[in-house]
Amino acid sequence: MKAQRCGSRCAAIAFAAGERLGDASNGADSGAATAPRGCHWAGILVPVMLLVVTMLLTTSHVHADTARITIGSATVAFPSSDPDAVPSVAASENPVSVGVRVNGSPGASQLTVAAGGDLVSGSAAIPISKVTWTAAGTGFTSGRLSSGQPQFVGQWFGKVDVTGQLRFWLENSWSYAAGNYSQNLVYTLIAY
Amino acid sequence: MKRMMVVAVLMVVCITWAIAAGWAATDQQTLTINATVADKAKLTLGTAAISFPDADPDSTPSIAAPENPVSVTVKAHAGTGSLVTLTVQANGNLGSGIDDTIAISNVTWTAFGSGFVAGTMGTSPVAAGSWTGSGNRSGSFSYFLANSWAYPKGDYTQTVVYTLTAP
């Protein structure tokens, strides 16, 4: 009974909420009984809920699969070397393959790398800026790691399906304390 | 009217969010970097041999080696706070033939450079320098032989061994 009475003043549940809400808020009344207070709030909540559902459905189409990065190795290691004989130490895993794939109707895509800090071994540290990389492959760029801000690794436009190679180097020095150093790098691919 | 405004604002926010979320896609991967720095020690001397020429003990009571100063370079990878040491040890006295000797303790040296120390040669290890932690250090040694009329005539020789330790 209540729903039927609301039906002439309030929205049909799916679509007429705004119009009926205006009727209710302006006090416009064709002479029939005034819509109950609950119908006014239904008029507010229904469109909001519809938009939330729309948003959720939209975001469910935004999935990591539309932008995918694959790295050929989980770790890279720099072996101990005589700084006089090996002033720049190559990572044992060089070259490291990096695959970038972007599907759909993208505009620009960008790959960056952020270091979690310096190379650390207990209380000893080697500045992460001592690590550099050279790049090969379309869109990939060489660079130097930084603990301050993400560094640019590559950029593409439109759909992307490329594989590049990164070679990592550590500047050697007699000033480094003996130890086993480690740090994590996070590669982030963003496709707009 | 107020309700209309609230609904309108909510609609704009939700639409904007939906559109923005639909336009950007992201992915992340982590790569771990490892680096090994092993204990390491490297010692370099500027010459392989020094010689003391013959001299009048009255006019030259202390004979300087012509090779003075002899450069010394000490390079080490060591743990933070670890002690890096340089020592020298003679294999015996200066000897000429079978019976003639000059006590090796008559050979002394002076040192230049941070961490390098002067000393007197001996047949046991003698400190020549010490440092803390990793680094590349350079200095020099100048060698002297105390002269004497008591030395038998001859050509004397001996080997001394420098040892650099980086624990």
Image (spheres, coloured by chain):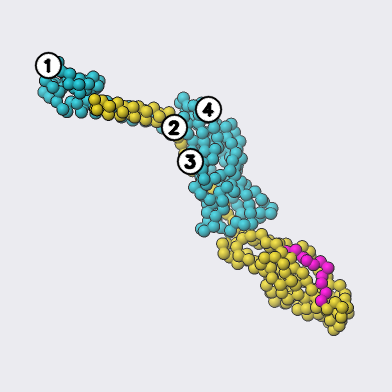
Chain colours: A cyan, B yellow
State the residue at coordinates (37%, 30%).
B17
The span from disc 2 to disc 4 (Cα, nearest Å) is 14 Å
Which amino acid, mark 2?
Answer: Ala
Q: Chain of mark 3?
A: B
Q: Residue A64 versus residue A32: which sits nearer the camera?
A: A32
| Marks 3 and 2 share the same chain | yes
Where B62 sits versus A39, above or below?
below
The span from disc 1 to disc 3 (Cα, nearest Å) is 65 Å
| Residue at image mark 3 | B29
Instruction: Residue A161 in the image: state x and y as whole percent.
Output: 53, 30
Q: Label 3: few (<14), some or many (≥20) within 10 Å?
A: some
The span from disc 1 to disc 2 (Cα, nearest Å) is 53 Å
Helix or strand or loop: what does disc 4 sit on? Answer: strand
State the residue at coordinates (66%, 67%).
B115
Q: Is residue A23 magenta?
A: no
Q: On the picture, is A190 further left or further right than B131?
A: left
Mark 1 vs 2: CB contact within 8 A: no
| Residue at image mark 4 | A157
Helix or strand or loop: what does disc 3 sit on? Answer: strand
Instruction: Residue A43 in the image: state x and y as whole percent.
Output: 22, 25
| Residue at image mark 2 | B25
- The span picked out in magenta is B62-72
| Residue at image mark 1 | A31
Q: Hey, which quadrant is residue B14 in on the image? A: top left
Mark 2 vs 4: CB contact within 8 A: no
